[in-house]
Image (cartoon, helix red, strand yellow):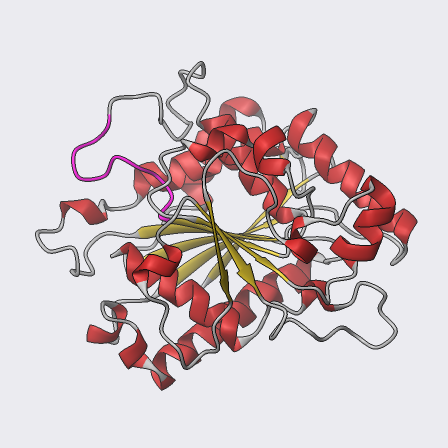
């Protein structure tokens, strides 16, 4: 099941029925009315799309990723020590955050959406709205830490998945919500005393082909180094990604994370390769604050004559395997 959330070009939340901005005082009520996590879900996946993605395409992308995950789990259940114990231990519910990302497929179009995404997250409201959304989902989901056995399926796990510029929105939202000076019950509450059994919020953050400078985590998203994410920040990169390679190089005088990986971070980086869907990820491969995964062997295809290269080639079995592995190790 997939639920969508739409933002305008300032990053403010739009009402699903009227298409009008939701008033500030109505945000909590709107979340309660439209975004209550279903009791049947074991995992909540918040997916934020990237450049050149229509609203319907964003929904299809999330559906495709979850469909690949379902197929992967059926075909290779033995690769997942926790999820593989029962067919009902990974039943995801996705919230797709959609935003106006369309432009000409050109260097100028890329720069235009880059500037819009940056403005929406910094000068606009996207970080605030997504932060409020994550805070609501975190407060409403049953606590997986309350289960007597960690392998139990009781509770719901929260995974953040971004692609391209969508990765920026997630990082800005988590950073905004983690600001200790914000004493707001609708934020993630990281400045509050730790809750026994669940001191953290998101269980993983997966960033596919992030459109940001390689030093973004040491200059823009510095608080993520110590943020109480329960799991890692995992970023994929591929040398076949021309959007964050050649185009990003022209626009910002350096390649982006999606092409060359996280270059500098305020915590140690672990470098590894994206594994094929038949090989299990050992916990020690993913159990780090920042993980660079080289996907150059898998993210290789682009649409014909599309100068972005393999920038959007992340909807693959290997990506579903990575998401399942993060969910498995979260147990």
Main secondary structure type of the part rendered in magenta: loop
> Residue 70 or 269: which is nearer the viewer?
269
Q: Quadrant of residue 114?
A: top right
**304 sits to left or right of 289:** right
The residue depicted at 44 percent of the width and 73 percent of the height is: 69
Work out whether 252 lies above or below 259: above
Q: Residue furthest bottom?
A: 75
The residue depicted at 88 percent of the width and 49 percent of the height is: 109
Query: In x, y percent, where is residue 251?
Result: 85, 43
Q: Quadrant of residue 87?
A: bottom left
Total numbered labels = 0
Verify whether residue 196 appears in magenta: yes
The residue depicted at 43 percent of the width and 46 percent of the height is: 35
The residue depicted at 68 percent of the width and 47 percent of the height is: 165
Residue 46 visible here: yes
Work out whether 183 lies above or below 99: above
Query: In x, y percent, where is residue 11?
Result: 66, 35
> Residue 123 or 185: which is nearer the viewer?
123
Q: Which residues are magenta?
A: 194-203
Verify whether residue 271 appears in magenta: no
Query: In x, y percent, where is residue 113?
Result: 79, 44
**147 sits to left or right of 203:** left
**216 sits to left or right of 47:** right
**200 sits to left or right of 181:** left
Work out whether 240 lies above or below 131: below
Q: Specify the quadrant that holds the N terminus.
A: bottom left
Q: Residue furthest left?
A: 148
Q: Specify the quadrant that holds the C terminus.
A: bottom left
Query: In x, y percent, where is residue 86?
Result: 21, 74
């Amino acid at each position: 099941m997939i639920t969508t959330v739409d933002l305008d070009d300032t990053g403010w939340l739009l009402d699903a029925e009227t298409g009008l901005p939701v008033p500030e005082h109505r945000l909590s009520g709107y979340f309660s009315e439209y975004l209550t996590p279903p009791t049947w879900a074991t995992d909540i996946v918040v997916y934020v799309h990237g450049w050149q993605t229509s609203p319907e395409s964003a929904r299809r992308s999330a559906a495709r990723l979850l469909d690949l995950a379902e197929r992967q789990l059926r075909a290779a259940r033995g690769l997942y020590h926790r999820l593989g114990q029962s067919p009902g231990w990974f039943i995801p519910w996705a919230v797709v955050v959609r935003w106006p990302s369309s432009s000409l497929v050109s260097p100028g179009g890329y720069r235009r959406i880059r500037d819009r995404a940056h403005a929406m997250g910094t000068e606009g409201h996207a970080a605030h709205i997504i932060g409020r959304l994550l805070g609501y989902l975190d407060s409403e989901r049953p606590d997986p830490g309350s289960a007597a056995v960690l392998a139990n399926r009781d509770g719901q796990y929260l995974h953040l998945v971004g692609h391209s510029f969508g990765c920026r929105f997630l990082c800005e939202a988590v950073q905004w919500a983690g600001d200790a000076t914000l004493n707001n019950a609708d934020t993630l509450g990281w400045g509050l005393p730790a809750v026994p059994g669940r001191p953290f919020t998101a269980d993983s953050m997966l960033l596919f082909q992030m459109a940001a400078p390689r030093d973004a985590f040491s200059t823009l998203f510095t608080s993520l180094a110590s943020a109480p994410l329960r799991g890692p920040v995992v970023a994929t990169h591929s040398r076949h990604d021309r959007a964050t390679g050649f185009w990003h190089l022209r626009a910002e005088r350096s390649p982006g994370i999606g092409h060359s990986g996280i270059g500098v971070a305020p915590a140690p980086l672990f470098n590894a390769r994206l594994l094929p869907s038949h090989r299990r990820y050992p916990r020690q491969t993913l159990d780090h604050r920042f993980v660079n995964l080289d996907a150059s062997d898998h993210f290789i295809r682009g649409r014909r004559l599309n100068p972005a290269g393999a920038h959007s080639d992340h909807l693959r079995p290997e990506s579903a395997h990575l998401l399942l592995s993060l969910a498995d190790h979260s147990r």
